[in-house]
Amino acid sequence: MSENAPNIVHIITLAAIAGLVSSVLGGIIAICISRPNKKFIGLSFVFVASVLITLVFVDFIPHAIGHGHYHTAIDPNNGQMYQYWYQHSGAGIWFTVLGVMVGVGLVIILTFVDKHGHEHVHGILPHNEHCSHNDEEETAISSKAKSDLTKSDKRRMIAVAFPIAFGIILHDLPKGLAIGSSGSLFAAIAIGLSCIPEGMSIALPLKAGGTKWWKVLGICGLAGLVTVVGAVIGYLVGGINVYLSGIMFAIAAGCILGVVFSEILPLAIEYSGRTKLKLPIMIVGVMIVITLNHFFHNLMH
């Protein structure tokens, strides 16, 4: 390794700022804006769904398949500017499709186990059949005070957060490898920007479920810590096989899509009601991800 190469402390610092700090920052934002109100939670889930779906199609899937872009350079011989196409390797279309199916399958299995093994814990079935006396009392209170949620509602929120976190962890590990193998400050800044909405996506359902703020930030931090682990591995071994990295992105995409369409969107529709705010909130979520993704690619390249 050359004398000018970044040392391990430099790599860990960059990765901690990119993953850990940014994910926790996203969690702090979510905690600050969160309100214990069904309509607000429904609208926040609309935002989470739009962020996650956009992330899948502008970030996860392109990295899984392998994507290319134009580079601008100057010819040293004549000083003229020219463009050339640079292709990033990935797992390819078929391994990506397989990885997405595996990710969706994992969510289906987890959902099946949750519903059939812990119905009394997570409150999946209708309240009139499986609610406790306390839940019925909370439901009555909820009808009087819009700010209250039943225990079953809160358990459903918490159950949604962990598949999201799992998918984001799979997504952030290869990004940590990129920091570790390059030691680039620009890469760390770019990855950190993309981690902020990811932290929000984990924190919003946790906070809605009544999880204490310090636990919410701790879980966001653990998800972001994976970036540090990936950076250390990238520093020590110089990266990871492009096919393995692509498959990890694909499985992460499958997990995210599975939980969005099976849990987040149904909850968003159920809780938000007939409000006209859903469309503008969804557009905001999409535009945030597209903007951050644009900065990500500009800083990386």
Image (spheres, rainbow, N blue to C red):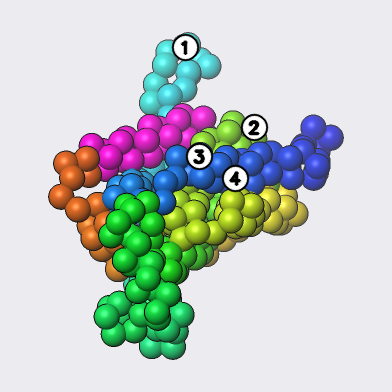
Disc 3 crowd, CA 10 A, few/some/many (<14, 14-19, 20+): few
Q: Residue furthest top?
A: 79
Pointer 2 residue? 185
Q: Tell me what residue is drawn at x 45 percent, y 30 percent.
A: 295
* CB-based contact (under 8 Å), mark 1 and mark 3: no
Q: Tell me what residue is drawn at x 35 percent, y 62 percent.
A: 141
Please name which of the two marks, 1 or 2, marks the residue nearer to the observer. Answer: 2
Residues in magenta? Answer: 279-301
Q: CA distance from mark 4 to mark 3?
A: 12 Å
The dot on residue 261 is: none
Compared across the picture, whether 175 is left or right of 69 comes to right
Chain-order first, disc 2 or disc 3 = 3
Pointer 3 residue? 32
The dot on residue 78 is: 1
* CB-based contact (under 8 Å), mark 1 and mark 2: no
Please name which of the two marks, 4 or 2, marks the residue nearer to the observer. Answer: 4
Secondary element at image label 2: helix
Chain-order first, disc 1 or disc 2 = 1
Q: CA distance from mark 4 to mark 1?
A: 49 Å
In this rendering, the answer to whether 117 lies above or below 214 is below
Residue 255 seen from this side: no
Q: Amino acid at mark 2?
A: Leu
Question: Where residue 165 sits: x, y (%)?
Answer: 50, 60
Residue 292 in the magenta stretch? The answer is yes
Question: Where residue 179 sits: x, y (%)?
Answer: 63, 44
In this rendering, the answer to whether 88 lies above or below 173 is above
Q: Nearer the viewer, residue 181 or 253?
A: 253
